[in-house]
Structures are given as C-alpha cells and as structure tokens.
Image: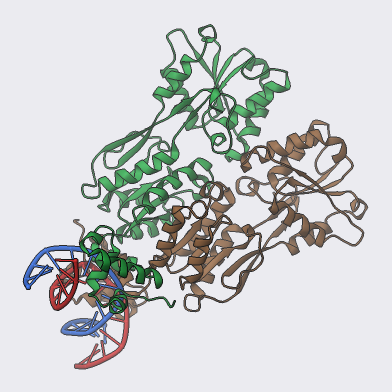
Chain colours: A brown, B green, C red, D blue
Amino acid sequence: MKKKNTLQEIAQLAGVNPSTVSRAMNPATAHMISPEKRKRIQAICKKYHYRPRLSARAMATGKTYKVGLVLGAIEQDLSNPLFALFIRGLCGALQSQGYALSILWAGHPDSSTDNETTAFLESNAADGYILGSAMLGSLTREAARACGKPVVVLNTLQPGGIDPEFINLTRSCAEAYREAWQDIPPEYYLHVAFFGKNSPDSMRKFNEVCRFAPAKASCETFLFDSNRGGFAFDLKNAEEFAEQHLSELKRFKVFFCASDLTALGLASAFQRIGYKVGRDIMLIGFDNIEATFEGVNFPTIETPWEEAGRSAIQALFENLDMPKTAITIPFQCRYLSSSHS
Amino acid sequence: MKKKNTLQEIAQLAGVNPSTVSRAMNPATAHMISPEKRKRIQAICKKYHYRPRLSARAMATGKTYKVGLVLGAIEQDLSNPLFALFIRGLCGALQSQGYALSILWAGHPDSSTDNETTAFLESNAADGYILGSAMLGSLTREAARACGKPVVVLNTLQPGGIDPEFINLTRSCAEAYREAWQDIPPEYYLHVAFFGKNSPDSMRKFNEVCRFAPAKASCETFLFDSNRGGFAFDLKNAEEFAEQHLSELKRFKVFFCASDLTALGLASAFQRIGYKVGRDIMLIGFDNIEATFEGVNFPTIETPWEEAGRSAIQALFENLDMPKTAITIPFQCRYLSSSHS
DNA sequence: CTGAAAGCGCTTACAG
DNA sequence: CTGAAAGCGCTTACAG
C-alpha cells in the first residue's frame, strides 16, 4: 500500500470532503460522522498509513503537541535511573494525549546552548516546559519565565524555595519519615544516625529526619565526601567510609540513609564484622535505585517518580491558559517497611 | 516589552513587508536584506522577543525541525550515564541547526505505547528517527521502516547484524583492542582472562578480545551472573564474585574487563589480598562510567559516545532525501593507556 | 534589495 | 450529519 500523504488524497479516495476525513480521524470529532462513513474513512486511512500531519494540525490549532524538558547537565540528570522513571511518567502521560516530549539541552549556564534554548523557548516550540535541572543558566530561566507558557520546576532538585512564577513540583517526605520513626523502638531513640554522601540533598533529608523525630530522640550525622562522582560509586564509597569509621558507627543502632545504595554500602561494612542487618542494626534507605531493580531487605522511603512525571504533565495541561500562577504540586513519598520485598 | 506574536506585527512596527522580516530573521536568507534594514528588523525582534513560530515555519517548509529518539525500556537506556553522553551529542548537533530531540517511549514491545509510537511515526512528527534501544516492538520497527524518513539504529545495542534498511551506527573496537594487546608483555600471553557480567555485550567484547589476540596468546572467561540488576551494582557484584573466585583468578596476570566498574570491583578484591594493580596484575577496563567522572588508573577502552551522537545526526541530515540506503557509520573506540589520567 | 501573493495541510466555525 | 471556505503564520518563487 503506497502511503497517501494528505487529507485531500484520502478524501478523494473516500469520495468525501476533506473536512469529513479530518473529523473522522480526530477522536474528539469522530462522533459527528455517521458510523458507516467513519469506519470506511478510518479503514482507508489505516490501509494507506495515513495520519494528519502533526505540523499542519499544529498550525491549524495553535498548539504544538510538544512539551519541552529543559536539562542543564544532561550527563548528570539523565544518568540517574530515577530520573528515567520521571521521564517515563512524562512520556506516558504525554503520548496518551498525542503529545511528545522534547529534550532541550541548556548546556552549562550561560554557554551558547543557553542561547539556543532561549531561541527555542521564544519560537513557541512547545506548549509548556519542565525545568528538570538545578543547573540552568539565568538566561534560560528568564526565557522560561517570559515565554508565556506554563512551566513546571522540579523542586526536589532546586535548593531554593517555591518559585511564585512557576508550577512547583515538590517532594513531601513528612508522612514517610513520621512512619519510619514509628517503626523505631524507643530504646534506640538515642542511637540514631543519618548516613550518606555529603550533599545538599542529604542535608535536606537529614533536616526532615530531625523534624519528625519523636521528643526524646536524637540524630547524629555521618556524611562522607565522595571522592568519586556519580551514583554508580555510592555503594562503594559508602562501604569504604563505613569501614574506616566502624568503631564510631557501632555506637548506633539505627541509620537513616541518604539512599538505598549508601545503605547497602553501610550494610556491607557491618556484615564484614558479623553484624546482621535487621537484627543488630536497623537501616532505613531512601529510594535511589534499588526499588527499580529488585526488592530491598530493609525499609526504605520511596519517591513515586513516574507518578510525579504524570502529575507534572497534568499540571501543565491544566494551566495551559493561565500560565503564571504560583502552584505547588506535592508528591508524597511512601515509607515501605522491609516486609514489602 | 510586551511580546509581539507574529511576523505581521513586527513587519508593521518596522514598516516593511512581512517577507522582509522573514528573510531578515532567517540566517540563510538574511544576506538578501540590506544591512541597515536587517539590523533594524533584528533589533525590533529582539526587543519584543520575537522568533518565527516553529510550527508555522514547519508548515511552510515541510520540515518538522524534530528528530525522534525511539526508546524501549527507558528506565534501562536512560539510566546509563554513557547513553546520556550520546543524547548530549544528539542534542548538541540538533540544536545548533534549530532542531530539537523528541523522546518517544515505545514502551514494552507490542504494548499500547507501541501503537502510540506508530501513530507518531505515521504523523510525520519528525524528519528522522533514531532507534536507541534493542527493546523495541516489531510494530515500532515496522513503522520506522515504513515512515519514509531516514532512520539510524544504534548497533552497539543490537545483537543482530547490519540492517540494510537503516543507517547503522556501529562501534568498532578493533584498533583499540589491537593496541591493548600490544601493551601486554608476551610472557603474560597465557595468563589473560576476560572478566565481566554475563551478558550479550560482554560476549561481544570477549569475541573482539580473542579476535585480536596475538598468535600465542589465549584468553579465558570469568563471567558472573548479576543477581542484582543495574550498573550501579556492577562494581559490587564484580567485587563479590572476584572474592569468591580469587584462587582461580590468581592464576592470571591480565584481565580484560567488560567495564571500568567491573574492573574496579576486581581491583578491590585483589587489593584486599595485597595485590597492587599495575604491579601484580594488569587490568584493562572498558568505559562504562568511570571516564565521565574522573580519570582511571588502569588502561581502558573509550567509546566516543558524544561524538557518536553527533555522527548520528549528521548521517540523518545527509540522508533526508534518500532515506532507505544501507549505510554503516562506524565510530572508533580508543585505547587509553593508564598514563592518560 | 523588496513586495505582493500563493501555498504548506490541516481544523473549525458556518451554513445547510 | 456533511460540505465549502476561511484561516492558522510562516516561506519562497516570482515580479519588479
């Protein structure tokens, strides 16, 4: 079947007006066409692999059917498996509506790619944007602000607070940490530590841990500077640090960990000296990677990244007309007790 | 400055014909306009943050200014830091030409997202496609074949051979392995092993190692089944396996490793028994992650992923008109001796 | 070098 | 339920 290229040609083949074909092919208007005619038209379209050309439809409707994901340090953002889940959420929600995700590499702040990004934003290349990285140049942020389209910022990655001009997608771990504390026997309250890589993200998590600590509890920190970058080294880095500081670490019974990988590293170190996780020490992970691949055997706190991606898209679609409201879309982390695996 | 939305408005402001504005704004035609007029028009456009709307331009030119990256198992593909480099290469090359990358999640083979992908491909949503994953449904592959647009397949991920209907981006490690062997003292030729995770990718690497082995050399394999998925565990998995098989491993002097991470795991295991890498044993890594973050202290084989991304785009652009030629675009791996760090 | 006009392939009031 | 027509905002021969 040779591919037919335009509405016109299909209309001729079907012996109807192009507008009839158009209506039959659009789910939103298909009901206007009599069932027999609709079926016949759709059959012809399928036969010739015809679909309305997206750019023509875009021109006619004023939409672009694109949402732009603006990334700064691609190599960092994209190499996190959890970010991949977020993207999957974005793509899933978009594609079911006939939209697609466009990646915009804003490069390093204020580089030439920053300008390309600005150009992209100013050329109405998408109906909405998602700022997915903390590493964005001011030019890019400014252009996003001025583009007249709704913008979602991923606030987990954003050290600052709520941005009044954007739609803020924020992570809320309150409930999860509260539940985690409830699982800790009170006799351990004075033997709780936070363990993880020294990073702003860890500090934020530590603050949350403290915020929801019971009255008589306390929490110390063990933060290691990672000489090797990338989360692929998190496990090993954690293990090495733990081995070096085992004598101090042994004073504690419970560890809130910055990630599942650091928790696994800590576990390895303890296992080497015969400690058993769950018996001698208690670990509470934070989903970093583990949950995407297999069950964990200690409790962890899960961030519903895919769901967050879907929420981001939903928020964009709901704000297509009134772009610049200060909105906060929280997504709740969940505490998963160890039995979940 | 209120944003001006159309060529018309800008033309009025500048007191010229819309076509003159159009020409002044397009780098390819700007030379047709007298310098003074051009400057004046460009200044006005900048002042009002005006750029020609991409979808209108697309309609007029018949291009889409998009290239689609078709991904199957997003969570796998995107979570590899090296794939991120590939994407950076794609985005960089595209953006400098006014193009953007669209992500297409084809989902699990033959699921409903497969249909969405087909719909996307049939609606002329991009000027070319890159099949970035081995995990693609047959529907998707078929649609890519039929879409009348150039298609690049990433052949490193493809177990099969060259596909005559696509542009094949293939990795060539011949030269790198040849050089690697040259660095190995002949007295070790009978004490060489390949070490890595048991996977098709490892097997292909092992085959290459053997193919370029000197006449009197031999190479055994040590492949471990990874009980934990994801490359974040590669290091730890390798280390554990190596510790369990240390007595056998000690028979060897040289290890070709499937990745830098597995090499690091192996190194850890040997270090625990006092061996020193570079003195007692020789490791040859394969860039998996390490090189993106820091120098390695053993030789490795680097795949120029970002360059590969740029090559993919170049190949697409060169084949916009004659899409279905069997083309092979090789990208050469490089052997990096340990001195490079 | 610049303008007037046709046209890209759809969608969607409007009329019947 | 269907058709004829206008229009979305650009680009690009064509004419001058």
**Residue B332, x across and y down, in percent:** 39, 30
Task: Establish if A162 lies above or below B154.
Answer: below
Residue at image x 30%, y 41%?
A: B167
Answer whether residue A269 is visible to the viewer in this image. yes
Task: Establish if B303 lies above or below B74.
Answer: above
Task: Establish if B322 lies above or below B53.
Answer: above
Q: Point out the image quarter for the C terminus of chain B.
A: top right
Out of B338 and A278, give the one closest to the viewer. Answer: B338
Q: Point out the image quarter for the N terminus of chain B.
A: bottom left
- Is residue A207 shown left or right of residue A155? right
Outermost residue toward the front in this view: B36
**Residue B185, x across and y down, in percent:** 52, 10
Answer whether residue B153 is visible to the viewer in this image. no
Residue at image x 54%, y 52%?
A: A84
Q: Count up the numbered dots.
A: 0
**Residue B239, x across and y down, in percent:** 66, 28
Out of B167 and B305, give the one closest to the viewer. Answer: B305
Residue at image x 57%, y 48%?
A: A81
Residue at image x 46%, y 14%?
A: B182
**Residue A297, x across and y down, in percent:** 73, 45
Q: Residue B55 lies in what quarter of the image?
A: bottom left
